[in-house]
Amino acid sequence: MTDFSWREQLKGNLIVSCQALEDEPLHSSFIMGRMALAAKQGGASGIRANSVKDIREIKKLVDLPIIGIIKRNYENSDVFITATMKEIDELMTVEPEIIALDATLSVRPNGEKLDEFYHAIREKYPEVSLMADCSTLEEMVKADALGFDFIGTTLVGYTEQSKGDEIEANDFWLMQKAIEKLNHPIIAEGNINTPEKVKRVLEIGVYSVVVGSAITRPQLITETFVAATK
């Protein structure tokens, strides 16, 4: 994991998010592994994946860099993406190139502060690259100052503080402002659901772009076609 040649592989290219939660029809490590293989054959340069089981299966089939997460709900917390050191420890057993975690202002498990969590990870696993999943420009600026290796727009519109925000509003204004203000590379993610949007955010200057639902969640893809029949 100390070889960072994979960074150039991601630059200017597509990362495919291969995830299916327990209540989704494709929930299966076997299926996610094949989904990742299909993404690689289609030209993807990286994979974002949820859970140790899925990452382990994906690594058997593809040699692409992986952004690893674990989604887990905690009582009295709005944070569920790699929320505690428990998830970090689990992910380190499969050594993804990047670990992404919620870096929003939302309430964290046990009232832990983001900066406390960040520094604890850096102390325990100094070699791992970290991605901040953010929902507002303020959060991105804070994550950048803390020293996250990558800043993601993953949670724009999904938190209480960003409700109503649209990631593509006004020609991706939020991304443009982030690029002006931040020192670390930005990974565009969230509602990037057409090839045209992928092209546009890369033109704006993001480091790379994650696409998930539009490629890997057939029930949602089907809904868009069904809607056209109504």
Image: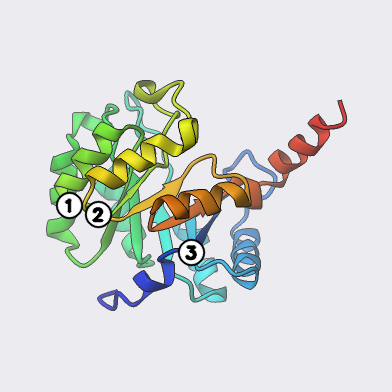
Q: Compute the Cα span from label 3 to label 2.
A: 17 Å
Q: Compute the Cα span from label 3 to label 1.
A: 23 Å
Reply above or below: 89 against 156.
below
Q: Residue at x 44, y 25 (%)?
A: 165
Reply above or below: 31 against 169.
below
Q: Residue at x 13, y 49 (%)?
A: 119
Give the mark, 2 or 1, whose residue is nearer the N terminus: 1
Q: Describe residue 213's horizontal placement relative to residue 158 as left or right.
A: right
**Residue matched to label 1:** 147
Q: Quadrant of residue 106?
A: top left
Q: Nearer the viewer, residue 213 or 52?
A: 213
Crowd tier of the residue under label 2, counting other residues whose Cα lies within 10 Å: few below 14, some 14–19, many 20 or above: some
Q: Quadrant of the N terminus?
A: bottom left
Q: Position of residue 73 (x, y in %)?
A: 41, 34
Give the mark, 3 or 2, whose residue is nearer the N terminus: 3
Q: Amino acid at mark 2?
A: His
Q: Describe residue 131's horizontal placement relative to residue 60 as left or right.
A: left
Q: Is disc 3 placed on a helix, strand or loop?
A: loop
Crowd tier of the residue under label 1, counting other residues whose Cα lies within 10 Å: few below 14, some 14–19, many 20 or above: some
**Residue matched to label 2:** 184
Q: Residue at x 49, y 53 (%)?
A: 210
